[in-house]
């Protein structure tokens, strides 16, 4: 487990914007110390400092007026926690090049689960050196440590010298750290120091039962997590892709044609893995790592499982044409990765002699290409739902998800289609005025709808539909199929009963052909 700490994250973000990404490698220009301030306890106090501000004796939580008295030329900037969060998430995206399991650690840290990934970069020591050196070149001050547990890596990064900690040195390294390295509350740290437990080693040598009685179970839990005796899972920011393939480029690329050419090659390398599993990709993600560390993610979907490289690249071609103006290549992309986010079983079916299923394939290809360019919600299809309420019996879903929805609903009980339902159902029932009807349960004889008066010639009903009580508390409906003197047929319902507290209301819900 690799833990990374960014002690000067807010000020590094400001310095990169002012002096460029390589300001640490080229040297800091002559400028006043940079600090960030925010309101704490109704007073403006320092919330972040750069290295120069720390060297002159400033500290977090200090008042701004006191800090200006110490250094009058101090550059004080209002804190921006949202920008700091976006900056940290951008670094986390950049760390995806090392492992897909990247988790945020508070406001200024990351956890990377590098199990099974370190050998790709020359070992654990090599991957740690590579990450820290690259971050330094990008103008970011970072400290890192690798151990077998997140707690120990966190403690060694923030309170120790970091580096690679093997299992033989784990106890000695942890014992030499202050009790604050156990990630407990400030009140507990002060209480431990009052009884002489200043270092983790003091806590380790003390009897566990008295510690639990006095300080609670959290202290021992944190100690066991740091020692690796208690499991502590991390929560990755993004789900792990089912399959993934990438290409590291010797020369950065930036044009659309170059991106698509590499995407085809990477998709070809995924085809064998998809065939071996008997699956096809339903949702793909193209990840572009820019030279300066920024990461772009382009996702496309397919209405049917795909494994052909040209078909996958065609979807990204449509998507790139739609967003290429917003895709800032900068100095180019150095890594291109293709992820299969979702997949389905791909049944190889041979076409019969009468039809080669070309129409079905052409429709799916059309849906995929239009959805890739204009968005998945641009094309909609209807699907049946388990509801007897007319307006809830069908929903609109993206056309690209129609096949998946149909396959999931196949074999499940559905509300049967009823021929007496109208061909056209109004999106919202419309109020019918001036209704003359038989009391208490008879059909209407005369009604007015949309300023037209209708004389009923024939009627059939009522058909009572009870509303779904777990969704709303509306009254039941009595539906009538009626025909007026001119031959027009309507679907009208009455909500409420005559003789009740409130008079019933009539609504027009549909029209028959």
Image (cartoon, grey):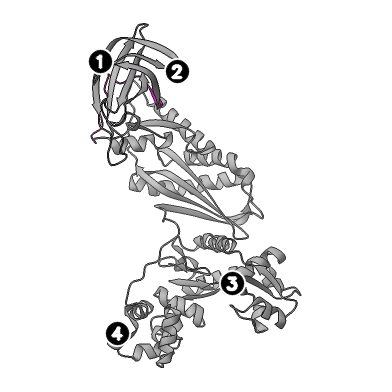
Quarter-wise, where is residue 179 in the image?
A: bottom left
> From mark 3 to mark 1, how far is it between C-alphas?
73 Å
Q: CA distance from mark 4 to mark 1?
A: 77 Å
Task: Find disc 1 in the rendering and name its residue.
Answer: 460
422, 290: nearer the viewer: 422
Residue 262: x percent and y percent?
55, 48
SS at circle 3: loop
- Secondary element type, mark 2: loop
In which quadrant will I find the C terminus? Answer: top left
Badge 4 or badge 1: first in the primary sequence:
4
Q: x and y percent of residue 417 in the render?
A: 27, 24
Picture layout, residue 50 above or below residue 304: below
The residue stretch that appears in magenta: 412-428
- Residues at circles 1 and 2 in contact by the CB criterion of under 8 Å: no
47 versus 58 height, above or below: above
Residue shown at 45% from the left, 64% from the top: 103
Q: Which residue is mark 3?
A: 42
- Residue at the location (48% across, 30% down)? 366
Residue placed under numbered mark 4 in the picture: 213
Residue under label 2: 450
Which residue lies at the image location 32% right of the left edge and 34% below the top edge?
406
Q: Secondary structure at mark 1?
A: strand
Q: Nearer the viewer, residue 55 or 450?
A: 450
């Amino acid at each position: 487990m690799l833990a990374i700490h960014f002690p000067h994250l807010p000020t590094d973000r400001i310095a990169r914007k002012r002096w460029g990404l390589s300001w640490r490698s080229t040297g800091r220009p002559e400028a006043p110390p940079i600090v960030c301030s925010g309101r704490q306890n109704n007073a403006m106090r320092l919330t972040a400092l750069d290295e120069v501000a720390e060297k002159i004796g400033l500290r977090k939580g200090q008042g701004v007026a006191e800090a200006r008295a110490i250094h009058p030329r101090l550059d004080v900037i209002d804190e921006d926690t949202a920008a700091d969060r976006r900056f940290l998430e951008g670094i986390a995206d950049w760390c995806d090049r090392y492992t897909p399991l990247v988790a945020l650690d508070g406001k200024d840290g990351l956890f990377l689960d590098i199990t099974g990934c370190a050998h790709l970069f020359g070992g654990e020591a090599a991957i740690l050196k590579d990450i820290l050196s690259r971050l330094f070149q990008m103008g970011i001050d970072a400290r890192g440590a690798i151990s077998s547990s997140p707690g120990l890596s966190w403690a060694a990064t923030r309170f120790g010298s970091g580096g690679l900690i093997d299992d033989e040195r784990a106890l000695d390294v942890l014992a030499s750290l202050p009790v604050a390295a156990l990630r407990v509350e400030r009140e507990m740290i002060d209480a431990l120091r009052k009884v002489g437990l200043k270092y983790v080693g003091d806590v380790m040598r003390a009897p566990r039962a008295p510690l639990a009685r006095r300080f609670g179970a959290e202290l021992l839990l944190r100690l066991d997590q740091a020692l690796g005796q208690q499991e502590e899972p991390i929560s990755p920011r993004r789900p792990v892709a089912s399959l993934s393939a990438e290409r590291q480029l010797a020369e950065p690329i930036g044009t659309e044609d170059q991106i698509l050419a590499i995407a085809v090659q990477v998709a070809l390398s995924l085809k064998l893995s998809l065939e071996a599993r008997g699956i096809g990709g339903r949702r793909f993600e193209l990840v572009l790592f820019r030279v300066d560390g920024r990461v772009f993610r382009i996702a496309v979907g397919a209405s049917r499982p795909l494994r052909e490289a040209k078909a996958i690249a065609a979807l990204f071609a449509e998507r790139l044409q739609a967003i290429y103006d917003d895709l800032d290549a900068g100095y180019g992309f150095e890594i291109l990765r293709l992820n299969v986010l979702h997949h389905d079983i791909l049944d190889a079916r041979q076409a019969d002699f009468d039809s080669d299923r070309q129409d079905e394939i052409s429709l799916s290809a059309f849906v995929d290409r239009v959805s890739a360019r204009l968005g998945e919600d641009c094309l909609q299809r209807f699907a049946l739902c388990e509801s007897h309420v007319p307006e809830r019996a069908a929903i609109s879903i993206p056309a690209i998800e129609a096949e998946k929805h149909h396959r999931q609903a196949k074999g499940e009980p559905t509300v049967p289609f009823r021929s007496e339902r109208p061909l056209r159902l109004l999106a919202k029932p419309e109020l019918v005025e001036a209704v003359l009807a038989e009391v208490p349960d008879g059909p209407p004889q005369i009604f007015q709808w949309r300023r037209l008066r209708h004389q009923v010639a024939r009627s059939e009903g009522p058909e009572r539909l009870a509303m779904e009580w777990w969704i709303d508390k509306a009254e039941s409906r009595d539906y009538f199929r009626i025909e007026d003197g001119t031959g027009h047929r309507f679907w009208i319902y009455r909500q409420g009963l005559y003789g009740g507290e409130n008079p019933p209301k009539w609504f027009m819900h549909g029209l028959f052909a």
